Amino acid sequence: MVDLENEVPPLPPRYRFRDLLLGEQGWQNDDRVQVEFYVNENTFKERLKLFFIKNQRSSLRIRLFNFSMKLLSCLLYIIRVLLDDPTQHKGWLPIFWVNRSLPLWGLQVTVAVISLLETILLSYLSYKGNIWEQILRIPFILEMINTVPFIITIFWPPLRNLFIPVFLNCWLAKHALENMINDLHRAIQRTQSAMFNQVLILISTLLCLIFTCICGIQHLERAGNKLTLFDSLYFCIVTFSTVGFGDVTPKIWPSKLLVVIMICVALVVLPIQFEQLAYLWMERQKSGGNYSRHRAQTEKHIVLCVSSLKIDLLMDFLNEFYAHPRLQDYYVVILCPTEMDVQVRRVLQIPLWSQRVIYLHGSALKDQDLLRAKMDNAEACFILSSRCEVDRTAADHQTILRAWALKDFAPNCPLYVQILKPENKFHVKFADHVVCEEEFKYAMLALNCICPATSTLITLLVHTSRGLEGQQSPEQWQKMYGRCSGNEVYHIQMEESTFFADYEGKSFTYASFHAHKKFGVCLIGVRREDNKNILLNPGPRYTMRLTDTCFYIHITKEENSAFKKQGLFPKNVCKPSYHGPSRLPVHSIIASMGTVAIDLQDTGCRSSSGPTLMLPCEGSKESRRSSIAPVLEVADTTSFQTCDLLSDQSEDETTPSDDECSASKEYAKGYPSNSPYIGSSPTLCHLLQEKVPFCCLRLDKGCQHNYFEDAKAYGFQNKLIIVAAETAGNGLYNFIVPLRAYYRPKKELNPIILLLDNHLDDLLRCGITFAANMVVVDKESTMSAEEDYMADAKTIVNVQTLFRLFSSLSIITELTHPANMRFMQFRAKDCYSLALSKLEKKEREKGSNLAFMFRLPFAAGRVFSISMLDTLLYQSFVKEYMISITRLLLGLDTTPGSGFLCSMKITDEDLWIRTYGRLYQKLCSTTGDIPIGIYKTESQKLTTSESQISISVEEWEDTKDIKEQTGFRSNHRNSTSSDQSDHPLLRRKSMQWARRLSRKIPKHSSKMAERINQQRLNLCKRSERQELSELVKNRMKNLGLSTGYDEMNDQQNTLSYILINPSPDTRLELNDVVYLIRPDPLAYVPNSASSRKNSISNTTGQDTRDETQL
């Protein structure tokens, strides 16, 4: 075996422990050489160069001294001119000789010697091997002309009165000033402004030209008119301004030649300077300049970082941001890497925005640009993603880098970040507020399927509005819809509130009901002082405290409200309770300048049995009337309906059938075992107990487990929900989870089908003929359109195709631009749509942020714009809780004890409640639900539109008698093409040509011709709807599908809209959908059930986590 200890060499001296202890004493015996670095800087020349040139501060002092010496020499020249008498010499002698006193000569010689020594020293230090380069420089030549003659006069006294053009030192002073400004910017570590330097150069050049001309004309005219300095100044100003009075003119040719030379120089030099100045000015207008440091320290400002700024994005931000009164004094600094387009530039020139909006051309990844925007002093920074990019992941990567750069530069600046894809959200988790587009988009699309128009509800809640939209409309639904759209979410401390301060120690449902009854305010949530989590409708067991923060829905916040008391009743007479619609309290809401006056109802006198809301007797035979139990101040645990979420016995009141029992055994409640991305909130869902093989997920292809190839063969009990998308991204997780939430009954779970191709055959195979909802989100491939508004083109056309083929199908989609909502379910000659278009234009002219709200597809919740997420992000600057509340409403976050959004439909059995106020009391006293709005559907009273007119072929044969048949018009649609309707002459000639041909046909073929003509007439008489119906039926036959397709009814005769927080006297009608915030069912599970749940989860939890799937 080899001796390893002998093989290892000893450690070098510098690694010995003895050397570490003894320091340099242990190095004395080492044969090492100490090397000194940068020895070239120790030379005398390098030290002088370091002091005079390289060091910014010392170089600045030297240049400042040089500049002052040049100004002093010019001042001494002016003093010499004022003391000189040109009459002592005659002829041309005054041009060469002057009178210079001895003290003045001594000062000028001293200045000349110092300047010469400095010039020689700097030339020596800057010498780089070419001496002629140093000698032939113009500053060096001028220095020699102004200093060497004074040095000669020291040794030759007769030359002391020799004229020396010292006034040329002004050009040397200009040169020293330029170098001094450069050193100044280097010394204070600031980026120099090219605009400032150019203006300085222009001004100094102009002053030097004028001063040179003044001194030159004055000196040369010593042999002529004997002009003074003031006369020369007057002559130069009049000449350079092209006025030319002619009262002062040069007489001798040298002065005339000087004037010519100076004018030529001015005509060459000044235009060049002005051109550079204009160019820099235009560049500064593009870059936006800088945000003033003084303004940043005295005024408040926020920064908006975008990759490209479009006019719609800018106006949405400005209108929403400045809609809040306390933000009127804020400045908005826009930091964008692209140049302003024409529309943005035109808007920013409007006085309303030019005083408050500053555009900076720069990148958020450059510290210099962040310094220009004064990011470290900003109140907040909004980072918006470019949702029109084809590669949305790349757009997110840019947003992430911007967020990192801003956090590194200004760690204390609050960040409001918008991200597109959920898998990238965890990279910006450090931001104060984050909005993920695909999370919110798919969650709203999912809730639209089970709670109609949830997207419209959320959009109206997050937009700032006074509720003035549609108030001038003649239609009642538009007035109600527009007025209720002004409701927003606000917050207030309970002890400071007039709305809720009286309900301390009361239950949450009691406070919510009575606040709505008395003030018309809908209390939806609270937050404890010692807890950051917001609880939506914590239920009747929650006791209100004065330190709680209350969140409510109202037309305006309480701080902007004034209260007036109605006339009180006598002491012994109690004010009547709710006994009918005529006696219901009417809440008069007066919206003016952000202030609301509310009529308070007198609730001081109550009956001993509490408020009773009863229906009047429906006949003399009935002695009893239906009544509603009062809402208790303190919750009674026995009066509320609880549910056992583990056994699901509360889902069905009747005994379930065998099919329902078998279906319930397939599902188990639990948390999804696999999360598609980091940062998704765990949600309790209905899961399959056994994992489905991957081969069974293809609906159109059979496998070894089943042979079904279409949705009809599966025999689904509930209607389908079809999602048409180009790719199956991680965002679909947020679409599936709300539809499989634990609080949804198992018998109401809808099958979900993901459709990645939109051909008619695929639509029929996936069961579109018996689907409940069709969700369309396939627009990623059109993001590369050159025109921004064309990003929605594919989605709009696909939805229109589906609408024409399956008109009664509920189609839900989202668009990028709100202006494109007018193309949803488009009818070219629909009179009602044209009327709504005019209404939208009027509301936009009034400055409304919700001008598109009256479009029928948006009001019905069939389309929404994803740009509302921008508004949600802007709102969070003033209302930091808005994102959290929106996520709780959409089910993206689940907080223990917080409720969830759901809906109930008014049936015949519920009509006895009659009004929204009575329903509020009924829900609060029984289930603890809090209603927040109503989704109403009404019949649309329309005149017959031209699009519903169908014209037969016989009417075209006789062009003289064209009459519209009203009965035929109401039953059929227009089946003629636009070409025929636009060119009747062409149609008439073609029919005449056909008749001439028919005369030439042989008689034996007349029967065949009649049969063909009859078939042709039948085809022409067929309506467009019949053609589409037959097309679908034929395709279903070819695919081997059962022809269960019936001609669907048109839904254009109905309209739907939302009333957020309506007044208590609002009538309930059949099929109304009421939005509810239902308490968390887990909060009502008894301890025994929870212990049972724990025991079950301990025994089967691991297997469920491994095997259950959505």
Image: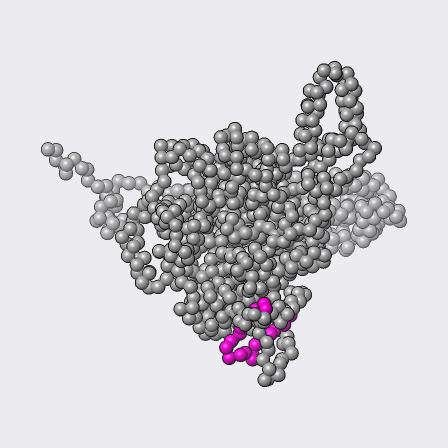
In the rendered image, residue 1028, in percent from the top left (x then y), is placed at 61, 34
Picture quarter containing residue 991?
top right
Picture quarter containing residue 1065?
bottom right
Given residues 205 and 643, the one toward you in this image is 643
In the rendered image, residue 220, in percent from the top left (x then y), is placed at 80, 45
Residue drawn at point x = 69 percent, y = 32 percent? 1021
Identify the magenta region: 597-619
As drawn, 135 above or below 666: above
As drawn, 271 above or below 1077: above
Residue that lies at the very extreme toward the left in this rendered image: 1
Examine the structure image and report whether residue 603 is included in the region drawn in magenta. yes
Q: Is residue 1092 left or right of residue 916?
A: left
Residue drawn at point x = 61 percent, y = 63 percent? 1066
Image quadrant where one finds the N terminus? top left
In the rendered image, residue 777, in percent from the top left (x then y), is placed at 53, 41
Residue that lies at the very extreme toward the bottom in this rendered image: 572
As drawn, 885 above or below 1002: below
In the rendered image, residue 383, in percent from the top left (x then y), is placed at 53, 49
